């Protein structure tokens, strides 16, 4: 049966009317300073939101938390649609919540992580995903120009990425978390995929959060952006409301200016702050603890 043309609001939003809500989240990798402290972010249904920030700012970690791969606090901290990303495994198993990341594997419901580099054909991989709509499958195979005879251990990075993306999109997701997966794709494949994502949001009310450093074509594609610096949310806006874009509608140069001003401010930080400013934390001490991180230890 062909997939539904659209989803009701109840199917794509939580009790606050958002597809994704992060409320008061704290997270630290073992033995490290907290990366996120009292972090909040709401993403509305149907958005195509860019997740932006420097290398190491926390984008991948945030996407993995939203995908339920890290536990953070109770059930109310990270809500995706109307469930808890970590606790409600049904969100991922049903395909409602999809995550496509950089590693060469694909999480397929209860089957867990499926490696994508063995001696398998593309056909074996794609047709091995159960419960999919054949029309959607054909559309994706065609869109991504996949040859079903490809052997996964002999294909190029871009070809392997196409198969991974195809498998990740077979179920009509309600929320899609994308961690720069278009990096290996050629321009045509990337632009076709972006167009497909746009249709998914416009026609089905799906929500996409997309972490990327490649800005080509995104000014007209994205509806929102969220910019994080060192685990802190600095901007969360509709693209049409980003005042810098009104002067120069070039996302690349706007984001470049934000990142460069970060670098300048970082350089101004003292390398050896006065001893009285240093706090003892369970994670050790660092001359670069932000006021947010300092607050965590008070
Ligand atoms: N498994 C891990 N264990 C410990 N620290 C980690 C781990 N993964 C990431 N980090 C640290 O967390 C911080 C955020 O990393 P993250 O990968 O989320 O950043 P990012 O914004 O996705 O970066 P990039 O743009 O380079 O992909 C970095 O300081 C990184 O060193």
Image (cartoon, rainbow, N blue to C red):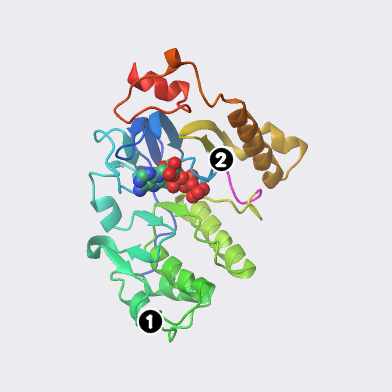
Q: Quadrant of residue 138?
A: bottom left
Which residue carries the number 1 mark? Answer: 123
Residue at the bottom extreme, as displayed: 149
Position of 145 relative to 104 (above/below): below
Quadrant that contains the N terminus: bottom left
Which residue carries the number 2 mark? Answer: 225
- Residue 66 visible to an observer of this rendering: no
Badge 1 marks a residue whose secondary structure is helix
Position of 148 relative to 115 (above/below): below
- Image spot of residue 164 (x, y percent): 42, 68
- Image spot of residue 21 (x, y percent): 38, 36
Position of 81 relative to 160 (above/below): above
- Image spot of residue 263 (x, y percent): 62, 35
Residue name at image x 40 percent, y 66 percent: 104
Numbered range of the magenta stretch: 219-224
Residue name at image x 37 percent, y 72 percent: 116
- Image spot of residue 218 (x, y percent): 63, 51
Residue at the right extreme, as displayed: 247
């Amino acid at each position: 049966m062909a997939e539904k043309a659209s989803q009701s609001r109840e199917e794509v939003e939580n009790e606050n009317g958002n597809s994704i809500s992060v409320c008061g989240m704290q997270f630290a990798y073992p033995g490290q300073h907290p990366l996120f402290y009292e972090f909040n972010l709401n993403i509305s249904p149907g958005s195509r939101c860019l997740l932006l920030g420097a290398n190491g700012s926390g984008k991948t970690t945030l996407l993995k938390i939203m995908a339920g791969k890290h536990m953070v606090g109770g059930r109310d901290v990270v809500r995706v649609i109307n469930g808890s990303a970590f606790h409600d495994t049904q969100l991922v198993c049903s395909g409602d919540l999809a995550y496509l990341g950089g590693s060469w594997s694909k999480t397929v419901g209860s089957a867990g992580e499926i490696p994508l580099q063995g001696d398998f054909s593309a056909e074996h991989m794609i047709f091995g995903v159960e419960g999919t709509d054949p029309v959607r499958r054909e559309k994706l195979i065609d869109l991504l120009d996949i040859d079903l005879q490809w052997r996964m251990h002999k294909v190029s990075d871009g070809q392997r990425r196409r198969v991974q993306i195809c498998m990740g999109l077979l179920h009509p997701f309600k929320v899609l978390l994308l961690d720069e997966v278009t990096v290996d794709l050629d321009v045509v494949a990337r632009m076709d995929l972006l167009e497909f994502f746009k249709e998914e949001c416009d026609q089905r009310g799906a929500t996409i959060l997309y972490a990327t450093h490649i800005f080509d074509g995104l000014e007209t594609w994205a509806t929102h952006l969220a910019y994080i610096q060192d685990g802190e949310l600095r901007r969360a806006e509709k693209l049409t409301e980003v005042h810098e874009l009104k002067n120069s509608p070039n996302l690349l140069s706007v984001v470049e200016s934000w990142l460069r001003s970060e670098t300048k401010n970082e350089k101004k930080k003292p390398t050896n702050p006065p001893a009285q400013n240093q706090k003892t934390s369970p994670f050790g001490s660092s001359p670069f603890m932000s006021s947010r991180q300092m607050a965590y230890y008070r």
